[in-house]
Amino acid sequence: MMRAFSLALLALATSLILSACDNTHAQENGAGGPPPAAKVTVATPQRETVEDYREFSGRFEASESVEIKARVSGYLTQAPFKEGGLVQKGDLLFVVDPRPFEAALKKADADVKVAESRIALTKNNFERADALFNSGDISAQIRDQRLQERDQALAELERAKAAREQARLDLSYTRLTAPITGKIGQKLMDVGNFVSGGTGGSSTLATIVAIDPIHFAFDLDEPTYIECKKHQAETGHSGIYKVAVALADETDYAHTGETYFIDTTLDSGTGTMRARATLTNTSGMLAPGMFGRVRVMLGTEKEAILVPASAILIDQSRKYVYVVGANNTVSSVTVETGATRGDLQVITKGLTGTEQVVVNGLQRIRDGATVTTEAPPAAAPQAGAAQ
């Protein structure tokens, strides 16, 4: 009896296992039917007129930079400024002990007075000698000697006046003021130190950089340079182009200005030409050395094909979009991109503007996949030129 019951259980287990295997085999052979088509959102590319531009990377530079150097030697007695702060043109920055220079000026004043008194004496001596010579009472040699003494005294007076002027300048050089408005850097010499002046080997005390306006330097590629020159020749354009700059952590190009300099020589090694733009910086947020991306507005308008930026996929150096074709199958199309306009991307090559481009559900499709499509929700139209 027990043996018969065990055989019945074994038969039942075998039957269940065979049934499960049959179901698995049926699923592997597609007996359950094809998987449902992926659902995606599609949109037709837009055609609009946009302003053309080119984008480059670069860095901000000070519009002016001045090293503050000692012009006379002496001990520093004052440095009444805050490091890293904003200074105005004419602000007092450093004071070199003026007392030796005040004494030198007083001596120079005295030397001028001595020279002036000698002028009066030698002038009178010559006038008397000239009269005596005309009456025949003295020789021409004595008259010429008095003339020489007078001329020498005149020369000594001029030399004394020059020395006094130099002493006055040296005294003025003991007060170093800001030659430009800008931010002043680190104090390189502290009060109490001896600084060296003069034309050679003078001590550098600090550096001031002008930050409003501020410059943005970048390298213009050769094709863009040629395009700009052709545009200038055809339209009489001034050669000054509007620019918009975005910082490293920004997506909008909110800092605007214009180019003011494009070099005259192309670098044969890089195939680029140095260019600079000037931007206002009233807030002082932009600082020399900061990285940014600049868009140079070329001043030309053209009809362009635009698709949502979310439709653009990147595979290494290749950019592509998925388009829906016959029988609702999708295929990838390689594209080249240009400017952006808000959330839209300009397509310069690869599309005709009549395609159905997949903008949502991209993660669920691949080349040759069958899809069901739906239109994107209506959105307010965007206006204006390329940003």
Image (cartoon, rainbow, N blue to C red):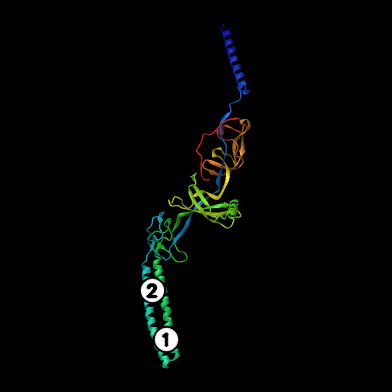
**Left or right: where 59 falls relative to 169:** right
Q: Nearer the viewer, residue 166 or 222?
A: 222
Front of the two marks 1 and 2: 1
Q: Are marks 1 and 2 in contact (CB under 8 Å)?
A: no
Q: Earlier in the sequence, mark 1 or mark 2?
A: 2
Q: Residue furthest bottom?
A: 136
Residue 260 percent across, percent down from the top left: 52, 56
Question: In the rendered image, which quarter contains the N terminus?
Answer: top right
Q: Mark 1 highlights which residue? A: 146
Residue 42 percent across, percent down from the top left: 56, 34
Rendered image: mark on residue 108: 2
Q: Quadrant of residue 164?
A: bottom left
Q: Residue at x 39, y 66 (%)?
A: 172
**Left or right: where 327 falls relative to 99:** right
Q: Nearer the viewer, residue 16 or 275?
A: 275
Q: Nearer the viewer, residue 321 or 250?
A: 321
Q: Nearer the viewer, residue 257 or 267?
A: 257
**Does residue 366 lie above or below 112 as drawn?**
above
Residue 321 percent across, percent down from the top left: 59, 37
Rendered image: mark on residue 5: none
Q: Residue at x 38, y 68 (%)?
A: 101
Q: Amino acid at mark 1?
A: Arg
Residue 264 percent across, percent down from the top left: 57, 58
Q: Amino acid at mark 2?
A: Ala
Q: Residue furthest top?
A: 1
